Image: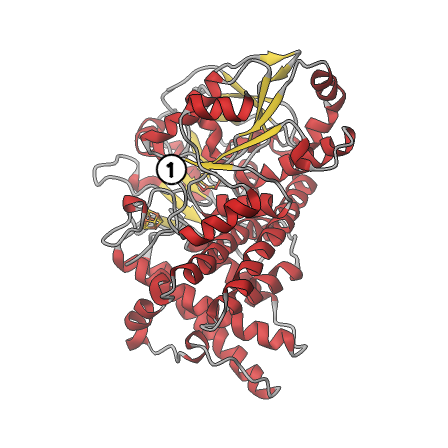
Amino acid sequence: MFCFQCQETAKGTGCTIQGVCGKKAETSRWQDLLLGVVRGVATISDSLRNAGIKSSQEVGDYIVDALFATITNANFDDQAILNKVDNGLRIKRKLIVLAKEHNVTLPNYQEVNWGGEKSDYEAEGEREGVLRTENEDLRSLKELTVLGLKGMAAYYEHASRLNERNENIIAFIEKSLAIVSNPEADMDTLLATVMETGKFGVDAMALLDKANTQAYGNPELTKVNIGTGSRPGILISGHDLKDIEQLLEQTEGTGVDVYTHGEMLPAHYYPQLKKYKHLVGNYGNAWWKQKEEFETFNGPIIFTTNCIVPPSPKASYKDRVFTTNATGFPGWKHILADENGHKDFSEVIEIAKTCKAPTAIEQGEIIGGFAHAQVFALADQVVEAVKSGAIRKFVVMSGCDGRMKSRDYYTEFAAQLPKDTVILTSGCAKFKYNKLNLGDINGIPRVLDAGQCNDSYSWAVVALKLKEIFGANDINDLPIEFNIAWYEQKAVIVLLALLYLGIKNIHIGPTLPAFVSPNVLNVLVENFGLGGITSVEEDLKNMVG
Ligand code: FSO
Ligand code: SF4
């Protein structure tokens, strides 16, 4: 196996024996096979599109779901991955027939030509790995694109579950996968594709923002309980708001409470979700602490997306975990939606009724809900604080959390920021500093949480608004610094989106991605001033003076 897609990759270069995340070599091979099939389907669909033949919604939904399933910590279930391979080959055959009927010539790529024989799955999985591209710079640009597309696909899938789709985004995903499949693709084409990925990343985040706010209202300033109640609970993790909505509907009046975990915390900020009285609070912290925190939760757990940490064999909770959407884990029950998108959580609810109430591991409240509409509602206050000098700088500290010790940097950086600075956060990175009680500036909390990692979109919207209010010529003239923590591929699309919006001098850490080759890094440094992190002291000096 060779996988270098996340920040925790072995030795900072690539996992070759087994994933640091727990992904087995075999699973990795099936994921490589799946990605090869997806590129084949996308390339054929792109050729059909270019010939004026639009493909069906099934094709777009398939590509999106399959990309999502290969994100770090999303799906560890070989059988589920292989089912997606089989389904992709079925779609591919249909598209080939369509191409023949319309005399469309298809590109002569391995991904298109491969016949899909079961006996050849293993060999094709090996052939389609990341190392198939020998030149490290071409490989780097191809992977930057594909990894960005994976993040984009995740956001698109959530939006589509709320019936928001965008054919232009699907057409771009197909086009860019066709470019990545082309063994002749050159540096310039690939670089342009990377940048365009950022553009469509913005569109995908905007689409999800629209879907979420239309369905559930605009996030609003909310205090979230981090303690526990006395009734049994269900813990719901991941990013899919449609799932938590259905769970809240189905648990109402059953005597079972609902708690959010990790990236589901922002569900509390939405008027149409927070209205449920039995949405009691948020339990625990970022994804990587789940092995200990699930032990004390005592009730069933639902994963709506990554990040799953494989449980230890002795884990007491391992028989009451459920997955849904693109996620999966061997032995865990997977909940499917019916043709109307409805999911039946009755089995989870019945298990919950037999469980003890969660054991409290924390007490108190955290505050959040500062997505763009809430920030705009406070705009006068914010602008006044900037003009009076009460707020000297904003620091965007969005992104992911992770288990590496080096991430203590973010807690220390947040704690040591001068009192006239405000942290703008989103994503699970917030758990590194959202319980530090950093106070407020004239009533404006010093940590403003917009929501999930996709809500980084809100900070882009806010930055553009501030540019307008302050009459700045360039977004980079505003008193905003970007110090982003990354872990998996959703952070890649967020980063590409920020670059597309023209934001310069972004710092990413705790380490630079293994999939960015030295030459590609040079391009990003020269054009965008992209940089890593150093020490807390040094970076504080450089970023906030
Ligand atoms: Fe975190 Fe995991 Fe949102 Fe990611 S829970 S790491 S970037 O999946 O998606 O922030
Ligand atoms: Fe390694 Fe990360 Fe890939 Fe897992 S996702 S195999 S930890 S690079």
Going 65% across and 50% down the picture, which residue do you hit? 203
In front of the other: 262 or 302: 262
Q: How far from the left and from the top, in percent, is residue 328?
A: 38, 51
State which quadrant residue 300 falls in. top left
Q: Secondary structure at mark 1?
A: helix
The x and y percentages for residue 156 are 58, 52
Foreground of the two, 361 or 289: 289
Is residue 259 visible in the rendered structure shown here?
no
Q: Position of residue 375 (x, y in %)?
A: 69, 27
Q: Nearest the camera: 420 or 491?
A: 420
79 lies above or below 20 = below
The N terminus lies in which quarter of the figure?
bottom left
Write down the residue under mark 1: 351
Q: Does residue 454 appear to the left or right of 126 in the view shown?
A: right
Write the residue at 63% across / 34% down: 459
Query: Callout 1 environment at 10 Å: few (<14), some (14 to 19), or many (20+)?
Result: some
Amino acid, disc 1: Ile
Quarter holding the C terminus is: top right
Asked whether, in this view, residue 424 is left or right of residue 300, the answer is right
Residue at image x 54%, y 56%?
194
The residue lying toward the viewer, choosing from 325 and 503, is: 503
